[in-house]
Image (spheres, grey):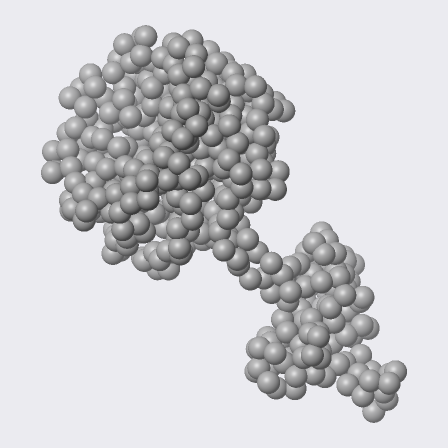
Amino acid sequence: MRFIGKDPNIVDAYYTATASGTLANGNKVIVNSDGTVSVVAETAGDPSAGTPVVYESASSVFNLVAYDANAQKVVIAYRDGGNSNYGTAVVGTISGTSISFGTPVVFQSGRSDDVTPVYDSNAQKVVIVYSDQPNSYAGTAKVGTVSGTSISFGSPANFESTYAFQVAAAFDANANKVVIAFRDGGSSDHGTAIVGTVSGTSISFGSATVFESASTQYMRIAYDANAQKVVIAYQDYANSSHGTAIVGTVSGTSISFGSAAVFESAATNEISIAYDSSAQKVVISYRDEGNSNYGTAIVGTVSGTSISFGTAAVFESATTSYTATVYDAGAQKIVIAYSDGGNSSYGTAVVGTVSGTSISFGTPLVFESATIQYIGIAYDANAQKAVITYRDTGNSNYGTASVFTSAPLSTNLTAENYIGISDAAYAGGATATIQIVGCIDDAQTSLTAGQQYFVQGNGTLSTTAGDPSVLAGTAISATELVVKE
């Protein structure tokens, strides 16, 4: 064999070294300071939160938030106690672990209750739904357009003429419709839903459908992208206030429902819901009055028009309030924010991992060392952070936001330590052969011939340079890559 240079480990275009950890055929590999080799990989750190930022220097109620994927901004909708309880919205921009805001915009010059924003990805608009108190609590919606750090609105449209309470909304990406759930105060507080269609800066509605012929409370709704259904979670007052969920199917401008399923056989309130796209499950979090008001979560699986549940898991062994739940797609984790009654009602968040029909939790993190209320949460896919919104009673009830990082990722890849690609599968401690500069690796997939590829921090390949920028090589076929420096 011919040696290149003075290192006897380098023969032609190969390098041999002891594997630190297992290597799979085709893994991108680094060399460690002790001369061993490891797969390029990322590790998750502990959750963290940025410094809280005020977006409304007055008492703020509801404080729910949605992410506008087109504008790459978050939109917070709230009732502004410093301005006659008017319905107000503000646009936020996340940068690193901080957030900045534009000027708040009034969307309703009258008291607005149950203010809820939702993003319509088809129309690329934010729809704000609310109960219009001066107009007999009519269920109302307005379409908002984000431009820069501001938002403008079309004309209001009523989806219920009177007494629409506890309004919740989600976007059905299969039907390209907004689905609104509400308690119909004009019809014995029955749980009701309606489908809205956005066109330009307007929204129109089909006919309302009752999904629960009894008084309902604490309604929240999420879209299950795998099942292409919406799931509404609520408290069923006629059934001892048990936590209940139901699956809805949108067709045109109508919605139909399967049979309701109980997820908690005890009085259940402070309900929130999110869809975990990695696990393809919904997660419902709530306060379990049957278990000392502990913060609890449960995983639901939609099949057809039905939903079934795993075993509930406690995430906080104390009274929880104002629960809000979101899925962090970057970390593939569920984030639950809440007011922790066991710790002076401080603002707290916990990260959950779904596995099958179960969910487990890490250690809760305090993001606001003061009593907080009216919590909202959304995931900013561009910044890969969650933003938590709330009323800070420790600061004059001001509307406040904090940027939350679920599991910050760090990589072992640097601009200098990448060496090549594993030629086969090796156990830890085995002598591994690594294909280095000039070698052709044939264990890749889905490459485009003639295209350069860069190593990413998690060991995958991309046509875009990562951070750090590390060139893997040039593809000569769908499975072959010429290794380069």
Residue 287 image position (x, y, % from top left) = 25, 42
| Image point (55%, 29%), residue name | 92
| Image point (12%, 38%), residue name | 239
| Image point (11%, 33%), residue name | 238
Is residue 267 rendered to the left or right of residue 134?
A: left
Farthest bottom residue in view: 1
Classify residue 481 by image quadrant: bottom right
Classify residue 69 by image quadrant: top right
Above or below residue 81? Residue 236 is: below
Residue 368 image position (x, y, % from top left) = 44, 39
Is residue 122 rendered to the left or right of residue 301?
A: right
| Image point (80%, 66%), residue name | 485
Is residue 352 visible in this depiction of the protein?
A: yes
Is residue 401 rendered to the left or right of residue 283?
A: right
Is residue 253 rendered to the left or right of residue 151?
A: left
Above or below residue 250? Residue 404 is: below
Above or below residue 308? Residue 66 is: above
Is residue 117 visible in this depiction of the protein?
A: no
Classify residue 58 by image quadrant: top left
Q: Nearer the viewer, residue 176 or 75?
A: 75
Residue 467 image position (x, y, % from top left) = 70, 54
Above or below residue 67? Residue 458 is: below
Q: Nearer the viewer, residue 34 or 422?
A: 34
Q: Nearer the viewer, residue 87 or 261?
A: 87
Residue 417 image position (x, y, % from top left) = 73, 68
